[in-house]
Image (cartoon, grey):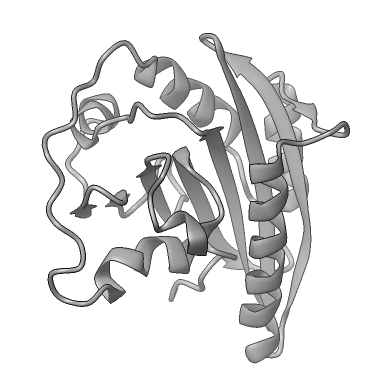
Amino acid sequence: MSRLPLPAAALIASVALAAPAGALAPAEQQVAGDYPATQLLAAFSQACGAIPNIEGAVSSVTNAGWVAADGALPQEMIEFLQFAKVEGEKIAQAQGGRSNQMRVFRNGVAGEDVYIVLSEVLIGNVRVTGCRLFDLGEERAITTEEAQRWLGRAPTKTQSYPEIQVSDWEPGLRPGHDSFQLFHVPPGSPVTATLKFTGVALKADTVGPASE
């Protein structure tokens, strides 16, 4: 089945590719440091493992111990949600579809205050359901090498620049997943003007019939 773009996901993945030649210099090798990469990846896999649709994703996330972020959100998360909502609606409406309301959850993982955002786009009889984890403002990254060791296979594609690093795995994290993506946007990156967030982000998505 052909992939449909999630709100903001297509823009995030294409930033480096769309840049003029020479605009982004290759990134230097990342140093893993003491960032809890394995713990974050494991928590993400547990929470976002079952995403048959947005209702199923909510159940998966809450069963993994995440709680709805009903209180005040960081300004960076507010701006990202506004951006993702607008872009998601544009994508859906351009193809005669609609986007469901995004859901936001929070948790503490290995000392990191992290968020999960659930989104869904419905176009015709096809739905794309996405689950994203954010560690906002984080200067350290989960390296492609760390994710590769944890997942047990090399990425399908990697883009590495000082302003943004993106690695893609297709198929995704679990059976039935369409894709898995790893992002790092360092604080101060000019890419933030477009994407509205900095730090570490992980994304899993599934594509299937809208009736699922």
Q: In this image, 161 relative to 182: left or right?
A: left
Q: In this image, 144 relative to 12: left or right?
A: left
| In this view, 70 is above or below 19 | above
Q: Nearest the camera: 67 or 25?
A: 25
- Count of marks placed on residues: 0
For the point 25% across and 32% down, the residue is 143
Position of residue 73 measured from the top left corner of the image (x, y, whole percent)? 77, 36
Quadrant placement of the N terminus: bottom left
Q: Nearest the camera: 89 or 100?
A: 89
Q: Nearest the camera: 147 or 57?
A: 147
For the point 87% across and 34% down, the residue is 70
User: In which quarter of the view is residue 29 placed?
Assistant: top left
Quadrant placement of the C terminus: bottom right
Residue 49 visible somewhere in the drawing: no
Residue 17 visible somewhere in the drawing: yes
Q: In this image, 65 relative to 24: left or right?
A: right
| In this view, 178 is above or below 76 | below
For the point 60% across and 30% down, the residue is 47
For the point 12% across and 39% down, the residue is 28
Position of residue 75 measured from the top left corner of the image (x, y, whole percent)? 71, 42
Position of residue 78 measured from the top left corner of the image (x, y, whole percent)? 73, 48
Q: In this image, 103 relative to 154: left or right?
A: right
User: In which quarter of the view is residue 17 placed?
Assistant: bottom left
| In this view, 199 is above or below 197 | above
Position of residue 109 measured from the top left corner of the image (x, y, whole percent)? 56, 15
